[in-house]
Amino acid sequence: MQTNTDGSDSESTPESRSAFRNMGWALALLTVPVLYVLTLPPVRLTTFKVGGQPAILNPPKWLRAYSAPYDWLIEETPLRMPLVRYTIWWMTLFDDDHSTRPPPLPMNP
């Protein structure tokens, strides 16, 4: 076994490698849903902006499928208000004519 200049072993134990690998998987499993939630409103709004009125009234099939988990979070969980506010925030960023900005939501549902 080799030792580093600080006296520690250069070879890691199987347990430490396993713990590091598990931490990587846990981070990935947390990152993917968070990135999905953070990116869905701009993806949806970009599709509507590029597709125009028909895309708003009849979203593409891929967008309906991609949006389904997000829509479920809004309809079925206590995350409704934060997600709606986040979507509205994105809408204000995409809004070319700020006179059409939606009114603010009430603080308490």
Image (spheres, rainbow, N blue to C red):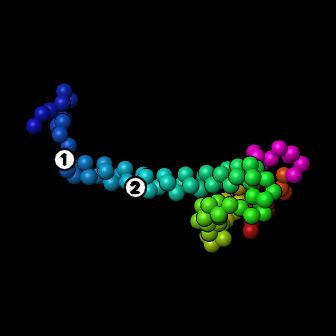
Q: Camera-side residue: 106 or 63?
A: 63
List the residue tagged with mark 1.
13
Q: Main secondary structure of the magenta part?
A: helix
The region drawn magenta spans: 92-100
Q: Magenta segment: does it hold 29?
A: no
Identify the element where label 2 is drawn: helix
What residue sits 75% from the left and 45% below the top? 93
Give the x, y percent position of residue 14.
19, 50
Considering only vertical position in the picture, is 48 above or below 97? below
Is residue 72 visible to the viewer in this orientation of the structure?
yes
Q: Magenta segment: does it hold 99?
A: yes
What residue sits 14% from the left and 32% below the top? 3
The disc label shown at residue 26, or none: 2
What residue sits 70% from the left and 49% below the top? 46
Q: Quadrant of the C terminus?
A: bottom right
**Which callout, 2 or 1, points at the residue further toward the start of the chain?**
1
Q: Quadrant of the N terminus?
A: top left
41 lies left or right of 11: right
Q: Camera-side residue: 73 or 46?
A: 46
91 lies left or right of 30: right
